[in-house]
Amino acid sequence: MTARILVVDDVKANVKLMQARLMAEYFDVVSAYNGPDALDICRRGLVDVVLLDVMMPGMDGYEVCRSLKADSRTAHIPIVMVSSLDQPSDKVEGLSCGADDFLTKPVNDLALTTRLRSLSRLKMVTDELRLRVSSNNEMGVKEEFTDDHIDPKDGREGRILVVDERQFSFKNLVKPLEREHTVDVVTVPQEALFRAAENEYDLIIVSLALEELDPLRLCSQLRSLDRTRNTPVLVVANEGDDSIVIRAIDLGVNDYISRPLDKSELLARARTQVRRKRLNNRLRDNMQATMELAVRDSLTGMNNRRYFDTHMESLFNQASVGGRPLSLILVDIDHFKAVNDTHGHQTGDDVLRLFAQRLVKSVRSRDLACRYGGEEFMIAMPDTDSELAMVVAERMRREIEGQPLGVRNGEMHVSITMSAGIASIQGPDDTIEQMVARADKALYEAKKSGRNQVQLAA
């Protein structure tokens, strides 16, 4: 898997060296020699991961990192900070200001490539989610999602599962993590997958020193199961586990930490993974919400005309091929404008909502009911001939006429009536457009004849 890496360093020799190393691993590389240029490249959406030197004149790496994470256009771009500073506090400071990782010079090839590949894969997932959200936003169904409300330090109070057989080992993990998170421990590796699937965890930490179960097989199973596929996995490696770490990253593991553990680094890496999980959860929730709004009328909660147009074709084709009946009922609220003029638009909205609820209760779950536009509603009824459709529509009409709607939370009641036009499929040469036109014409005849009645298309 390739990706475009932005290398940011004020020393040209360092940039050239890093370019050569990354290109040998088949990454695309772009470069910047100062903070402002790096910000500009990132804001133009030209990179997948930023490899950022800490010690730069003017705007140092920490400031660049904070600026990128504070900008909604760039907050989702993974950042790996690189520095000759080798104190644990330096690494923790970098991770705390929003960086996804921190490497110390001279950079180990294993650490560099595994981190970049893991973060590139994460960026690809995030980009796909953002693209879907953006596509839905273009429909005008929801405001654009932004990341500007996501605090780079927001990675606390998560729920973490630790998988480790050895008591002295998992205690070293649990003790620091419990300062900020709720931690569950599984000491029988075979139970880990079931525990992870049954609960909503923000991070799963797996020891690579498991003896009762191949830890890589467990990581693979976590990635293949729907319930855990999107949960970050961090593995704990021993010295000399380089080849196992590489395979773990290839299997989809998000991050690793090596023993002996630095407690501050463990906390910082856990925060990073929890924060990333929450960001992608918000993107997924936003995408689901926009997809719902794209096909659902926000006022009545019914399916909208877009949904009807999409699914009516399937119903029509099934009826045509199988020679089965199919009917449409086009319903309109009589004198709805008078309701708005007399009682106000808020009452009119209440009428539409309550009327829609009555219609939905009057049809079968297999019927396709939608708000067709304004005060018009369309119901497609598979395996229903015109006579049965007439019975259903007439029952609706009587119920609407006989039971006033309790608007404004029941403070007042509004009496309304409805008119309906019915059309049924007329053989293999019929079309959806012709059916809708006949139902519309029948509705027109019902209104022309005095309203509060049901008409069947000729």
Image: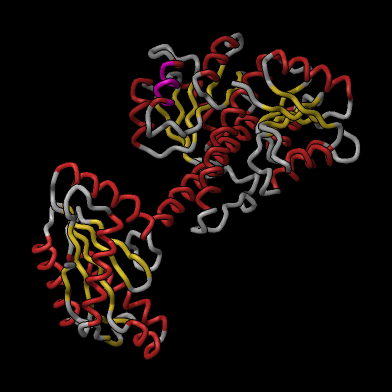
Tell me if residue 218 is in the magenta stretch. Answer: yes
Point out residue 444 in the picture as x, y percentages from the top left corner.
Answer: 26, 75
Give the residue at the far bottom of this rendering: 342
Residue 394, placed above or below residue 36 = below
> Which scheme is used to colour this image of the protein?
secondary structure
Residues rendered magenta in the picture: 217-223
Point out residue 23 in the picture as x, y percentages from the top left corner.
Answer: 72, 17
Point out residue 379 in the picture as x, y percentages from the top left corner.
Answer: 24, 62
Task: Give the camera-side residue of 160 and 68.
Answer: 68
Q: Residue at x 17, y 78 (%)?
A: 453
Q: Residue at x 51, y 44 (%)?
A: 132
State the image quarter where residue 94 is shown: top right
Q: Residue at x 38, y 26 (%)?
A: 192
From the image, which quarter does the C terminus lie in? bottom left
Q: Residue at x 67, y 17 (%)?
A: 26
Magenta-drawn stretch, dominant element (helix, strand or loop)? helix
Point out residue 448 in the picture as x, y percentages from the top left corner.
Answer: 24, 82
Residue 76 horizontal side relative to residue 320, left or right: right
Residue 206, placed above or below residue 300 = above
Residue 93 horizontal side relative to residue 259, left or right: right
State the image quarter where residue 33 is shown: top right
Task: Give the camera-side residue of 157 and 196.
Answer: 196
Tell me if residue 371 is in the magenta stretch. Answer: no
